[in-house]
Amino acid sequence: MDRLKLVLQYFQSNSESISNGICIVLALISVKLYTSFDFNCPCIPQYNKLYALGVMFVPPLIFFFLGILVNRHTGVMMDEWLRPIGKRSKNPAIVKYMFSAMMQRALLAPMVWILVTLLDGKIFICAFSMSVDPKPFSGMPNNTGLDLIKLMAKVPCKEDMIFRNSTFRKAVSRYVRCYSQAIGWSILLFFILLGALGRLIKPCFDDHATNLQTRYWSNYLDIEQKLFDETCVLHCRDFARKCVVQFFEGMREDAVLRLPLSPEVRYRGEEDMVDEEEERLHGITKQEQMDQLLQTWFQCKPELDVTRMAYRPRVCVTWEDHNGQTLYSDV
Amino acid sequence: MDKFRMMFQFLQSNQESFMNGICGIMALASAQLYSAFEFSCPCIPEYNYAYGIGLLVTPPIWFFLLGFVLNNNVSMLAEEWKRPTGKRVKDPTILRYMFVSITQRSLIAPMVWISVTLMDGKSFLCAFSVNLDIHQFGNSTLIDGMTEVEIVKLLAKIPCKNIFNQPEVISREAASRYIKCISQAFGWVFLLLMTLAAFMIRAIRPCFTQAAFLKTKYWSHYVDIERKLFDETCKEHAKTFAKVCIQQYFESISGDMRSFHKHRSSKDDSDDDDDDKKKSDEDKLLGIRDQDDMNKVLWNWHTCKPPLALRKEQLDGESHEGLIPNGDVHGVSGGPNGYANGHAPDLPKREWAAYYSKV
């Protein structure tokens, strides 16, 4: 439990970490989806390749678009790209940086899917079993009456009657799988080398100082957007509260000003308590008033203007003696 | 338990994430329901199609409607749509925004069901096995010897492993593999189209109407919060209303001219603490001190409930009476409330200022 909390806290510490976290979650989902997907090769010459390559490339497309969708930075980047200049000058380097970061993250889950399919090999077998030359393999069944292509197309399907317990089928599958895994590992190696080279060589070509600036300002944009949203929410809440209270008070029938008598004739404690109660009543004390209030709330919602409430005037009391001379005044 | 609580707290932190949580739960429920559901194709030519397609289409409709039912914002949308204009102008973009966001959330669980069903392939197999081109999978010589009706019956039995009894005519596995593969292709294409649609809506939308969008988002959020705060304020008001009403009822039965503020002359100031304690007990009795009074209270509460009209506080009326002999206060005519002894306020709205003199 604690560990989970720590991990969550780490990932929520800044928005880059959140994006990385989401990206990793998508990659894990892609692996899980592959393992739970029931791959079902049709074993028919015209359709094998189509099906297999479809399963290899359509889900990566889906994951790519999903990766772009769930990334918060997409919205921030689009905002920054499309906004009018106004009082803040636009820096194209920031947009480019955000775009490349977003692309890199979005490409992880598709790559994971493709690698997993290659390393597993089922899809390759389904797609390319027909292209295998059967001569090096012994034990090919030749009494089925099917032509070569149809026979080879059935290799991926274990349950088919002609291939029950057939060493031929197993040999061909192993051969194609081995090709598939070789391609998979090569692609993985290629990308790792590319990443390593990029990391090592980039500083030679890049201006580090500009890089720092770009990263800072793109992070700033993201945080600014989040804070703006939060401030809007808080403001919304205050605005709504004032509007509702103003509405209640507007339905009162009389304005009562509670003025304090001379202090020692009352007990402040309970006075405050009653004040609080009166406060919560907002002056609505009868059934008809309440009914009218609820009816009006629906029929005629109050205007969106809480200036009166926000700048409510204070009641000022002036104390005078019997001669009319001012002893004390709040004014 | 702890995990649930944490998740719950996180989800309730704001309305949007709560709705997203419900949406996610419904999607999981839909996947779970599919896996728990025991699919049993009837394997009869007339009913296969209806069963297969019905299972593909009816639960999504049900989940979609359930999404609307579970979403609190639906009633808010209806209210905002139907209200008279009054002092507040109605903005159709807000209604559109609310409707679109509710619909988007409700569409996720149906989508999950449809994709899972298509990926699994059973319902497609059940629905379309009779439309199979039998010559592609079967033994032509044996097929030519069968009548049309027999062929259709045989094809309809393909989805059912246990009752399919003619493997020499058609290879059942090959046929079901073929149909399943088509079903999965449909499934992936469906997912791709949905994702593209969502991508267009979310990623491309900022190209148009971004400023208007921010405005719409703020005001639709405002409507939601305002409604909640109004309910809260009404609840608080009702509580206080009830409390004061009951206190006044007790007081009216007991007949005491009590004030809620224990009103003493200055010489008791030294005993303030004890007085406070005794005062609160006395207060809590609300003037009812014997059995007959209490019985009267209880009886009348049922037979003759008090009207829903609170009297104003009698404090100033009393202090008025209490103090006048001392001659300390004058110029209190009418007092700040304008009435003593709790007459209902029929006076028109006016503002009072009272000048007190303190000698």
Image: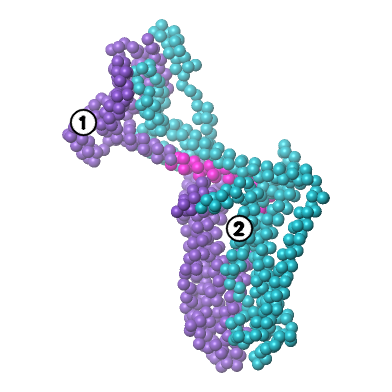
Chain colours: A cyan, B purple
- Which kind of residue does numbered mark 2 sit on? Val
Query: Residue A292's image quarter?
Result: top left
Mark identifier at residue A25: 2
Camera-side mark, 1 or 2: 2
* Left or right: B281 as drawn, with respect to A157: left
Q: Is residue B160 above or below residue A228?
A: below
Mark identifier at residue B289: 1
Q: Residue at x 67, y 85 (%)?
A: A168
Q: Mark 1 lies on which chain?
A: B
Of B256 and B290, which appears nearest the observer? B290
Q: Mark 2 lies on which chain?
A: A
Q: Magenta stretch containing residue B133, yes or no?
A: no
The dominant secondary structure in magenta is helix
Q: Where is residue A304 in the image (x, y as percent from the top left)?
A: 53, 36
Q: In this view, does A320 lie above or below A54?
A: above
Q: Where is residue B279 in the image (x, y as percent from the top left)?
A: 29, 26
Q: Residue at x 52, y 27 (%)?
A: A311
Instruction: Name, please, the residue furthest toward the front.
Output: A3
Q: Distance between the residues labelled 1 and 2?
A: 69 Å
Q: Judging from the image, what secondary structure is the residue with disc 2 in?
A: helix
Q: Which residue is drawn at 50% across and 38% down?
A: A240
Look at the image and give the residue range highlighted in magenta. Answer: B203-231
Q: Is residue B28 visible to the viewer in this orientation of the structure?
A: yes
Of A186 and B263, which appears nearest the observer? A186
Q: Which residue is drawn at 57% across and 48% down?
A: A9
Q: Judging from the image, what secondary structure is the residue with disc 1 in?
A: loop
Of B214 and B29, which appears nearest the observer? B29
